[in-house]
Image: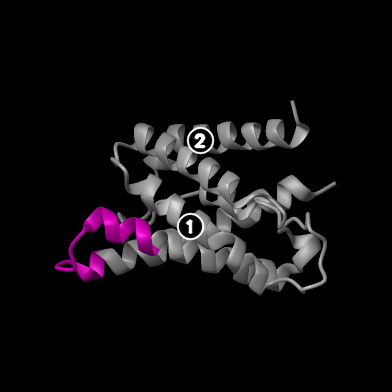
Amino acid sequence: MNIDFLNRLLLFVVLLLAQALVLNHIHLFGFATPLLYVYFVTSFHRGYPKWGILLWSFLMGLSVDVFSNTPGVAAASMTALALLQPYVFELFIQRDSDADMQPAFYSLGVTRYLYYVILLTLVYCLLFFTIETFTFFNWTQWALSVAGSTVLSVILIVVVENMRKSK
């Protein structure tokens, strides 16, 4: 087996277990839920096949749906985010960058990495809570959920990235 596949599978399992066992039970102020599994999509390197990103992301979303009792919401949102990730990543790198460039603090720099993570997490939270709510009658609840979950998720992603890449 390929070492990249095993690393990706390990990250998949760790993020899924963290989300299902711990993070799904946190609802700060009744609005903000940390969605750490978004980090899985943000971690794909530049040359990774787009079909692979779609497949991994759909499986992650489907697994989160099974454990979170959100039928299809995470799967649809993760798949849509997987469609956007390669193109968003291209916005933050130079054209002559390596084909296997990994999105991280050390490769993008802190500012560009933060913008990259904030953009993808915001798009995910917009999609997730829009599909979950499926109405705009209570738009303040929706907006607070999107904003709170985005901020909390970005903080957790930055912490995990900092721990994961520190050598």
x, y (%) of residue 61?
Answer: 43, 42
Please identify the dominant SS of the magenta region.
helix
Q: Is residue 90 magenta?
A: no
Task: Choose between 140 and 125: the one closer to the eye.
Answer: 125
Task: Choose between 4 and 25: the one closer to the eye.
Answer: 4
Question: Could you tell me the amino acid type at mark 2?
Answer: Leu
Q: Which of the 4 image quarters holds residue 2?
A: top right
Q: Give the answer, above or below, for where 147 lies relative to 9.
A: below
Please provide the residue range marked out in magenta. Answer: 126-141
The alpha-carbon separation of the residues under discs 1 and 2 comes to 17 Å
The residue located at (64%, 74%) in the rendering is 91
Q: Would residue 128 appear left or right of 6 to someone viewing this image? A: left
Q: Would residue 138 appear left or right of 4 to someone viewing this image? A: left
Q: Is residue 129 magenta?
A: yes
x, y (%) of residue 6?
Answer: 70, 30
Residue at the disc numbered 1: 81
Give the position of the N terminus as an image quadrant. Answer: top right
Which of pointers 1 and 2 lies earlier in the amino acid sequence?
Answer: 2
Task: Choose between 104 and 152: the one closer to the eye.
Answer: 104
Q: How is the image coloured?
A: one colour
In the rendered image, the residue lying farthest to the left is 137
Q: Secondary structure at mark 1?
A: helix
The residue located at (76%, 69%) in the rendering is 109
Judged by depth in the image, the label closer to the viewer, 1 or 2, is 1
In the rendered image, the residue lying farthest to the right is 167
Q: Give the answer, above or below, for where 87 lies relative to 19.
A: below
Crowding at mark 2 (Cα within 10 Å: few <14, some 14-19, many 20+):
many
The residue located at (45%, 51%) in the rendering is 79
Q: Give the answer, above or below, for where 108 lies relative to 33.
A: below
